[in-house]
Amino acid sequence: MLVEEMTWEEYRDGVGHKILILPVGSIEQHGPHLPLNTDVVIPKGLAMMVAEAVGAMVLPPILYGYKSHPASGGGPSFPGTTSLDGSTLTHLALDILRDTCRHGGKKLMVMNGHYENVAFVAEAIDLLLREVKDSVRVLLVNWWELVSDEMLDELFAEAGFPGWEMEHAALTETSLVQYFAPELVREDRIVDDQSERIPKYSIFPPPDDIVPSSGTLYKATYASREKGEKLARHVTDFIVDIAREEFGRQ
Ligand code: ZN
Ligand code: MN
């Protein structure tokens, strides 16, 4: 399932007919309780669940992502938040996708875990299609966009849903890491937090009062492993349906 652990012959035998999933994340602060690779752990975990269900292959993830924005990731001021220029990310993703297609890959899925990556990964896919034309189909999946309103109502019955941008190092990401990699969660460091003001525009460089000092943008104490499992299964079911619809029965 994990391409990096396959031999070239095993890879060769699957690449032309299986779905190939590329997780893309970030190295970014995620509060006092979650690891810097939270945005990698989540899409890689989801990719593995989808791969299990449809027999897909999971490509080695892109660990780094585009620059963290204060309103959706805390911004660049935290030690550890290490980001790529947009063109770097675009060309890194393009190089990987292009070579995957050169080997015969035709059904590609980019599983994104970091809000700020979206435009730059979409650009990579667009540039790829200029080269490979319609011999290849690529899906770009942002997991948070697949969560139904009913699931949100259920998960946020007590905490109240703040909008996806603010859901950084908060209920959903904490719950999902508790499910996928519980050993990485510092349970005794989980806090609720919120910035003093939330401007509806961007300020460069970002002032201190628009970013909570903990790095958690909302309520993380409402997280649980059970919520993480429920959410992971919900999103996986959705992606499996999408894969079958867009790529045919696997
Ligand atoms: Zn995140
Ligand atoms: Mn992020």
Image (tube, rainbow, N blue to C red):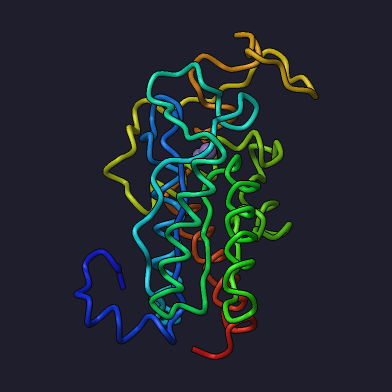
Q: Position of residue 243 (x, y in %)?
A: 57, 78
Q: Position of residue 239 (x, y in %)?
A: 57, 70
Q: Residue at x 42, y 29 (%)?
A: 82
Quarter of the rendering containing residue 198: top right
Q: Residue at x 31, y 73 (%)?
A: 1
Q: Give left or right: position of 211 versus 83.
A: right
181 versus 126 height, above or below = above
Residue 160 higher or lower than 109, as above or below = above
Q: How many marks?
A: 0
- Say which residue appears at 60% left-offset and 62% top-offset: 140
Name the residue rendered at 64%, 9% in the picture.
207
Q: Residue pushed farthest top?
A: 208
Toward which corner of the image does residue 160 lie, by quadrant? top right
Closest to the observer: 48 or 100?
A: 100
Compared across the picture, whether 45 is left or right of 145 comes to left
Tell me residue 234's x, y (percent).
56, 65
Taking the view exactly as shown, the residue that stands out farthest to the front is: 131
> Picture coordinates of residue 137 (x, y %)?
60, 75
Q: Nearer the viewer, residue 125 or 176?
A: 125
Residue in the foreground of this view, choosing between 48 and 24? 24
* Residue projecting furthest to the right: 200
